[in-house]
Amino acid sequence: MSTPCRESELDALLAGELSAEDAERVSAHAATCATCTRALAWLRTERGWMAQRARRMPSRPALRFEALEAKLRPAPAPRQPRREHRGWVAMMGAAAAVAFMALSMAPRSHSTSHGAFASFSSEDAWSQGMVSIARVPACMDPSVEAVALVEASFGACLLASPARPLP
Amino acid sequence: MSPRRVSHLFAVRLPLVGGAPSAGDAERRLLTRARKGDPVAFRTLFEQHSPAVWRFLRDLFRDDAAADEATQETFVRAHGKLGALRDDARLASWLLGIARHIYLESRRTRGTHLDIASEENEPLLEASLPSPTPEELLLNREMEGLLAEALGELREERRSALLLRIDHGLAYEDIAQVMGWSLPKVKNEIHRARLQLRERLAGHVGNGGHS
Ligand SMILES: [Zn+2]
């Protein structure tokens, strides 16, 4: 994080995502750099525009809960994996975890950054997925590429319906 | 100007320590209740998050009715899979990820090919474009229309990544998750999207385009 004139840093500054030390460094640079000053003006304007646009969103009938309610099934109760599936589930979970970790390597990502999708390696979530695989596409990991690659490694559509044909 | 004074201009937020329970805590409690089958809790989560999910889907489909249907489908799936969300703090990005998946599925159903072209070289921060004046922070109807057009001209992946950042406020790491990209690619694509948007709008800002 030392190269000046990097827009993602200016953006992170406005979003309050930088450490105090980095914020000072980026701010000090931006104050003396015409390019960064212009970029900051754009970044602030974009934020303002998007906020105004969001507030002007039309009200939609589909956003009434009543419109959704009839489609909801009761939330699935937590359940133990079926005995005959246990070994397979654990094996698949482990294999998918390995595949997913390989797919999701990214510099500077901290330990919790994959947390929302950590169910990928959880036996519980997998066992739930097994029961309802046909009806629930890859909610666990919504990135199509990741899902398609994991599926390809098993040679079958086990996780999801990929948005792209498998190779 | 000293660095210390400068930093105040940008109103940098620092993490809060202690104090009152945050909105995040309230959402965690709602999620816990919703997982146990509490319909009121799920309804509250729906009401809090469905406008953003709908807006994201509307930006992808560019069609109100399609966004309606896909928003409902997003929450039907989320309802059935709440147990799969392991980090409650990432509910918003998880929902937007489901939403995008549903969008991609529908595109596949319609036989549309996805544009997966990708450029490798990161463009430099453009110095020559005029920048908006503080008055232009107010989004008038004309600019709103131009903005919608400019967003629509971005290819879908780039548009998604940009909106996840500038409209939905996701962290770059979370966008990497939703898009299935590396962190450098996320930054590169969002930067390119912004430059494309600015080039399109530059003629309409900064006192008529004079820099
Ligand atoms: Zn600079």
Image (tube, helix red, strand yellow):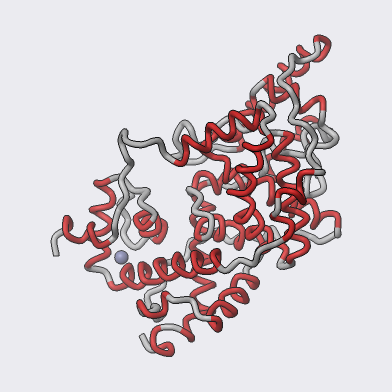
- Give the total of numbered labels: 0
Q: Nearer the viewer, residue B189 or B141?
A: B141
Q: Nearer the viewer, residue B136 or B24?
A: B24
Residue B52 appears in the picture as rendered: yes
Residue at the outermost top position:
A83
Judge from the rendering whether residue B60 lies leftward or rightward of residue A52; answer left or right.
Answer: right
Residue B21, image x, y percentages: 40, 35
Quadrant of ligand 1: it is bottom left
Q: Residue at (55%, 81%) from the top-left corner?
A: B141
Which residue sits at x=71%, y=44%?
B75
**Splitting the image into 4 quarters, where does residue A129 fall?**
top right
A152 versus B75 height, above or below: above
Q: Is the C terminus of chain A in the top left, top right, bottom left or bottom right quadrant?
A: top right
Residue A115 in view of the camera: no
Of residue B59 and residue A120, the one placed in the foreground of this image is B59
Which quadrant of the view contains residue B120?
A: bottom right
User: At x 73% / y 38%, what residue is drawn?
Assistant: A138
Q: Is residue B129 left or right of residue A35?
A: right
Q: In this rendering, is residue A25 above or below A125? A: below
Residue located 68% across and 19% down the image:
A123
**Image x and y of residue B174, in percent:** 53, 44
Find residue A44 and report its horizontal and vertical position in percent: 39, 67
